[in-house]
Image (cartoon, rainbow, N blue to C red):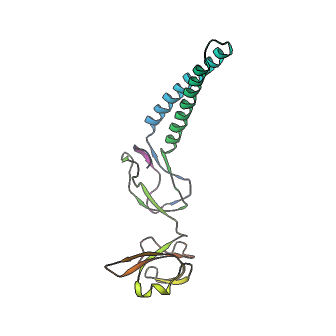
C-alpha cells in the first residue's frame, strides 16, 4: 500500500495466477476523490484569475507583477491537481509481475497503511536459491559460474548460475550467503523449498 485507506476489494487469493498490471486490491478512494474535486475547483479559480490578469495587463489596468502572481497560482493549482491524480492511482494495487500469489495478508474492510504488505507474488520461472556456504569452500565458487542444485522437493537436480556471493561472513556458522538463479524450473519449485 502507498496510501492509508480501507480495503474495498481483494481480487486474488493464495495460489491464484496473476498477470503483470492486473488489479489485485482496490482501496477506498473517496477521500482522494474529494481532494481532487477541491483541487480542480482551485484550478478553475486560478485559471480564471490568470485569464483576468492577462486581459487587464493588455489593457494596462494591472502590473506585470500581478500577472506573474496569477500565473504562479495557476501553475501551483495545476501541480496540485496532478499530485492528487497520482495519489488516486495508488487506490488500485496492481501486480508488479506475472506470477502466482503465495500469500494474502489483507481482507476487505482492513486498513492498509503505507508499506503494509497486502499480497505476496512470485514468478515461478525466475527462482533464486540462497544457500549458506562454508567459508572454506567459498573459493570454489565465482559469480557467473554454472552449478547444479539438488533440492529435496521436488527431489531433482536443477541447473543454476551463481549471481551473488555476499561478502559478509556469518560469525556463528562461518558461512557466506551464495545466491544462485535457477534455470528452467517452471512450476516445479515453490518458494521456501529447502
Give the quarter of the image for residue 43: top right
In this view, the residue in front, 135 or 5, is 135
The spot of residue 122 in percent (x, y) is 49, 64
> Furthest residue to the right?
58
Q: Nearer the viewer, residue 111 or 68?
A: 68
Residue shown at 53%/84% (left/top)? Answer: 147
**Is residue 156 positioned above or below 86 on the image?**
below
Check if residue 184 falls in the magenta segment: no
Residue 18 x %, y %: 53, 58
Depth check: give the residue in front, 178 or 58. Answer: 58
Question: Going 43% across and 41% down the picture, which residue do you hit?
Answer: 28
Q: Could you tell me residue 156's position as x and y percent?
A: 49, 83
Q: Which residues are magenta?
A: 6-16
Asked if the magenta segment contains residue 8, the reply would be yes
Q: Is residue 59 left or right of residue 75?
A: right
Please give left or right for residue 192 compared with residue 75 in the image: left
Q: Is residue 23 left or right of residue 194?
A: right
Q: Quadrant of the C terminus?
A: bottom left
Q: Does residue 37 lie above or below 130 as drawn?
A: above
Residue sitting farthest toward the left: 172
Q: How many marks?
A: 0
Residue 165 image offset from top left, x and y in percent: 47, 76
Q: Is residue 42 above or below residue 151?
A: above
- Which residue lies at the image location 44% right of the left edge and 70% below the top edge? 191
Amino acid at each position: 500500500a502507498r496510501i492509508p485507506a480501507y480495503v474495498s476489494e481483494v481480487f486474488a487469493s493464495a495460489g491464484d495466477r496473476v498477470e503483470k498490471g492486473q488489479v489485485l486490491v482496490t482501496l477506498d478512494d473517496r477521500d482522494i476523490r474529494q481532494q481532487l474535486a477541491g483541487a480542480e475547483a482551485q484550478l478553475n479559480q486560478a485559471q480564471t484569475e490568470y485569464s483576468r490578469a492577462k486581459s487587464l495587463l493588455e489593457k494596462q489596468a494591472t502590473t506585470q507583477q500581478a500577472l506573474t502572481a496569477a500565473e504562479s497560482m495557476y501553475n501551483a493549482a495545476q501541480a496540485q491537481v496532478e499530485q492528487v491524480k497520482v495519489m488516486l492511482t495508488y487506490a488500485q494495487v496492481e501486480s508488479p509481475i506475472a506470477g502466482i500469489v503465495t500469500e494474502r495478508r489483507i481482507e476487505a474492510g482492513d486498513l492498509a497503511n503505507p508499506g503494509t504488505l497486502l499480497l505476496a507474488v512470485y514468478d515461478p520461472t525466475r527462482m533464486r536459491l540462497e544457500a549458506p556456504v562454508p567459508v572454506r569452500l567459498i573459493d570454489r565458487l565465482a559469480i557467473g559460474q554454472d552449478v547444479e542444485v539438488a533440492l529435496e522437493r521436488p527431489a531433482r537436480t536443477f541447473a543454476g548460475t551463481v549471481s551473488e556471493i555476499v561478502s559478509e561472513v556469518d560469525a556463528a556458522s562461518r558461512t557466506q550467503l551464495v545466491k544462485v538463479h535457477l534455470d528452467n524450473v517452471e512450476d516445479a519449485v515453490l518458494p521456501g523449498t529447502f
